[in-house]
């Protein structure tokens, strides 16, 4: 089956035709490294890892180039560095913050079964490329110098707004922020800006005397050109990046290179929220990948990275996703079963074709997973089917040889609070007597998320229900 992908640019699903099948090229906007990556940031990382694996399967491992950048110059990084290392010179503090955060990001996403991209460029390693592009844009009349800044002149690009589906008039009417006096047009955006003393700074382009630093959007235009060329196949990121980040990337790249497109296909993952609410520090539901893996802060337990991955892929990438302990508990139950079935099994053959077909339909992971549940069932009935299941799960990054114990991190350390469990059992039986089954189910699920399973027994004479419990692994 031909690979079909939904394209934000054309707003429909199209058959994917690479510009060069010998070198299929994909760029995905990576993290700004100032803090732990949160579980929302994990979504594009996992989703585009699945696409990378699929492209490698379809075109050959040697014929796919995947670039995922690191943004290591940003105001948020500067602020964090000043806060965390007040005694260090700012530039040293920044180097510490970006090195620590990048290392943490790498170890977090490796646990999620994510392959390394072909290239992981850093913004600070591409300042010369950014400056060259900025000079080109000025020379072609798409950008101008004003008060130590270089600005992209939005009205100079006829197609501006096409990716995000906004007209320039609408955008200008809606621009409520105070517009800097040096801008020719309210929508003009920064390509280069002056640095304050002590901030990271490079010699400026375009004859500007003061040293400065690049704007965020130009980073991706310069890095994608360097590693993938002026026009490439797929550009991805979260839906929040469509405007202004991706719209501005398109403007910069197309105007600098004189091309009608920057990427053939634009793909955007939907947003993740936590237990029904937008994730935010003030609501207390902000959850990092590291907290899921290494602390008991979500659902009262640590979660294995492959369980997190499976939970993420249960929803189609373009849909919003609600992150709950229940979702993780279900994924964990599946992974326990997989670990039991696959222990000691050698993978043979290729990934299941129906699974590949489901993924080829705009990465339909829910459909791929329902086929996989069928494969699990058939492996349970007949162990001869286990090797094919293993090959399929490995292909999707869902299995790396984990044992049942591995999938239950921290299980030895967790003390069971028997009194609290007995209280929960009493509350649940009470709720059932009131026929408040919503509440009784909620209590049962809450305990299940902590690995405590209830067993009900009915006294044959009195009809009374008693509940015992056990720790599931
Ligand atoms: P940032 O470091 O904020 O630029 O984000 C890195 C990546 O994570 C981008 O592709 C964002 O679109 C994506 N992202 C950020 N928050 C969420 C969220 N809550 N759900 C899904 N994707 C997100
Ligand atoms: Zn970008």
Image (cartoon, grey):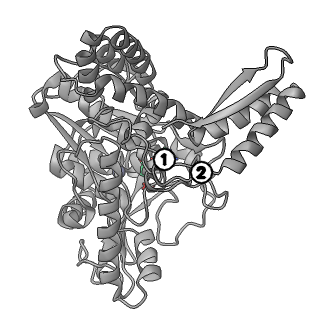
Compare residues 311 and 131 and report the one nearer the observer: 311
Residue on which disc 2 sits: 279
Inspect this view and state whether residue 217 appears.
Answer: yes
Using residue 47 as the reference point, say whether residue 302 is left or right of it: right
User: Can you give x and y, in whole percent of width and height, for residue 33 in the image?
Assistant: 37, 63
Secondary structure of the residue carrying tag 1 is helix
* Dot label at residue 40: 1
User: Can you give x and y, in whole percent of width and height, for residue 164 in the image?
Assistant: 48, 39
Report how far apart the C-alphas of labels 2 and 1 lie in the structure: 8 Å
Query: Residue at (29%, 48%) from the top-left corner?
Result: 110
Secondary structure of the residue carrying tag 2 is loop
User: Which of pointers 2 and 1 lies earlier in the amino acid sequence?
Assistant: 1
Query: Residue at (71%, 50%) from the top-left corner?
Result: 419
Q: Is mark 1 within 8 Å of ligand 1?
A: yes
State if disc 1 and disc 2 touch (CB < 8 Å): yes
Using residue 163 as the reference point, say whether residue 179 is left or right of it: right
Q: Is residue 247 above or below residue 61?
A: below
Q: Is residue 240 above or below residue 335?
A: below
Using residue 238 as the reference point, say whether residue 467 is left or right of it: right
Label 1: how many residues lie within 10 Å, few (<14), some (14-19) or many (20+)?
many
User: Can you give x and y, in whole percent of width and height, for residue 361 in the image?
Assistant: 36, 17
Count of number-bearing discs? 2
Compare residues 452 and 216 and report the one nearer the observer: 452
């Amino acid at each position: 089956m031909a690979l079909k992908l939904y394209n934000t640019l054309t707003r429909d699903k199209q058959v994917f035709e690479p510009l060069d099948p010998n070198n299929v090229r994909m760029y995905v906007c990576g993290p700004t490294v100032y803090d732990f990556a949160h579980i929302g940031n994990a979504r594009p990382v996992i989703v585009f890892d699945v696409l990378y694996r699929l492209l490698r399967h379809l075109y050959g491992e040697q014929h796919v180039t995947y670039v995922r950048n690191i943004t290591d110059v940003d105001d948020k990084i500067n602020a964090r560095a000043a806060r965390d290392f007040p005694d260090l010179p700012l530039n040293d503090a920044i180097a510490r913050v970006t090195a620590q955060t990048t290392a943490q990001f790498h170890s977090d996403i490796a646990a999620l079964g994510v392959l390394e991209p072909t290239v992981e460029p850093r913004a600070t390693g591409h300042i010369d490329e950014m400056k060259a592009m900025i000079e080109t844009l000025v020379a072609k009349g798409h950008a101008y110098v004003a008060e130590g800044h270089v600005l992209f002149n939005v009205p100079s690009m006829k197609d501006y707004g096409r990716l995000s589906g906004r007209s320039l008039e609408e955008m200008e009417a809606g621009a409520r922020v105070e517009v800097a006096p040096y801008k020719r047009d309210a929508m003009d955006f920064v390509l280069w800006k002056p640095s304050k003393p002590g901030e990271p700074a490079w010699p400026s382009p375009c004859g500007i005397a003061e040293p400065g630093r690049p704007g965020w959007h130009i980073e991706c235009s310069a890095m994608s050109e360097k590693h993938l060329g002026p026009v490439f196949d797929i550009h991805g990121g979260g839906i929040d990046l469509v405007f202004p980040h991706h719209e501005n990337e398109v403007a910069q790249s197309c105007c600098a290179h004189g091309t009608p497109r920057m990427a053939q296909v634009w793909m955007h993952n939907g947003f993740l929220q936590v237990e029904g609410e937008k994730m935010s520090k003030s609501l207390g539901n902000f959850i990092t990948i590291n907290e899921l893996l290494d602390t008991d802060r979500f659902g009262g337990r640590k979660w294995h990275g492959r369980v997190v991955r499976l939970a993420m892929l249960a929803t189609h990438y373009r849909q919003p996703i609600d992150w709950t302990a229940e979702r993780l508990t279900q994924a964990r139950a599946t992974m326990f079963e997989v670990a039991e079935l696959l222990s000691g099994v050698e993978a043979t053959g290729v990934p299941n074709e129906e699974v590949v077909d489901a993924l080829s339909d705009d990465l339909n992971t829910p459909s791929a997973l329902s086929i996989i549940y069928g494969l699990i069932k058939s492996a349970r009935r007949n162990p001869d089917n286990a090797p094919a299941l293993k090959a399929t799960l490995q292909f999707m990054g869902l299995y790396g040889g984990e044992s049942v114990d591995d999938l239950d991190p921290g299980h030895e350390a967790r003390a069971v609070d028997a009194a609290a469990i007995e209280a929960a059992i009493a509350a649940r039986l009470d709720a059932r007597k009131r026929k408040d089954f919503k509440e009784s189910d909620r209590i049962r699920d809450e305990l299940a998320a902590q690995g405590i399973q209830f067993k009900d027994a009915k006294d044959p004479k009195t009809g009374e229900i008693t509940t015992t419990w056990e720790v599931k692994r």
